[in-house]
Amino acid sequence: MSTQPEPWSREVFEEKLRGKSSSYHIHHPFHVMMAQGKLDAAQLRGWVANRFYYQISIPRKDAAILANCPDREIRREWMQRILDHDGHGDDEGGIEAWIGLGQAVGLSRDDITSLRLVAPAARFAVDAYVNFARQATWQEAVASSLTELFAPHIHQQRIDTWPEQYPWVDPAGLQYFKNRLTQARRDVQHGLNLTLDHFSRTRALQERALEILQFKLDVLWALADAILLSQCEIEIKGPKRG
Ligand code: AHQ
């Protein structure tokens, strides 16, 4: 006699994954202030510089998934994510586009690539994600990427609001967000299908997938916390002298 509750249907399971949108970082005070045009230039630059550490970590996270995944067909499709960020052929890739975003908000290439502006807690949040992908099963690491179910909304919000709220930012810098609108939708369809396939077998697995998604939502939330706090520290200590 099984005491385990029956697994949810595939549709209900997907609804429950999507139902976690209320924890997405679009609702974080920092991103709310960004959308409302309340960030000053230093705060916007700080966000771009800190988020660069997340961007350069994504391909290494995806490489960890490839390393753990024995299925050639899945690897062939998942590999596209690394190419999207690292670039391939004539396509400079998303990491280069993020550097372009940094230059559009007034940072130098070295300000960004040196990582000297990255706050310790921001680094820890991102490292928690990469280390999870290295140590978890490839299916669990795939499930953790599903925060991108909610990403098109935040990318579109920046595309819509920055030109009006931050007219001093070179609009060419928004190209990264425009690229992610299609890439995120494609990626998340693949990740969602893999997650629904693997985790739908038992209710315990389904609950585990929700727990993993919440972990990654907390990574993004903690990253925004770190960025917001690092800017308060600048205010407390005053701008760096010299
Ligand atoms: O630019 C982002 C990106 O390339 C990715 C990959 C994906 C993953 O594998 O976890 N998640 C993700 C995200 C990106 N941008 C974030 C943003 O707010 O700009 C959103 C983030 C995500 O929702 O996970």
Image (tube, helix red, strand yellow):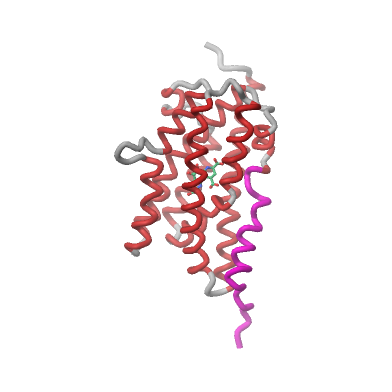
- Residue situated in front as seen by the camera: 232 or 16: 16
The residue shown at (63%, 20%) is 237
What residue lies at 60% left-to-right and 84% top-to-bottom?
2
Q: Residue 197 placed where, x, y %? A: 49, 69
Query: Is residue 44 part of the magenta span, yes or no?
Result: no
Q: Is residue 202 above or below residue 81?
A: below
Identify the image quadrant of residue 71. bottom left
Front in this rendered view, residue 59 or 150: 150
Q: Nearer the viewer, residue 121 or 20?
A: 20
Q: Is 82 situated left or right of 39 in this image? A: left
Q: Is residue 138 above or below residue 114?
A: below
| Residue, far left | 89
| Residue located farthest toward the top when viewing the structure as drawn | 242
Along the line of sight, the residue nearer the viewer: 120 or 10: 10
Tell me which residue sits at (40%, 41%) in the image: 85
User: Relative to 118, is 128 above or below?
Assistant: below
Instruction: Return the residue found at the far bottom.
Output: 1
Residue 72 seen by the camera: yes
- The magenta stretch is 1-26
Please state the horizontal and vertical placement of residue 239, each as a whole percent of the image. 60, 17
Percent of width and height locating residue 81: 41, 48
Image quadrant holding the N terminus, namely bottom right
- Does 126 sit left or right of 31 as displayed? left
Residue 19: give x, y in percent of width and height: 66, 58
What is the total number of numbered labels drawn onto the structure image? 0
Q: Residue at x 66, y 50 (%)?
A: 23
Q: Is residue 232 visible?
A: no
Predominant SS of the magenta segment: helix
| In magenta segment, residue 4 | yes
When asked about the image quadrant of residue 136, the answer is bottom left
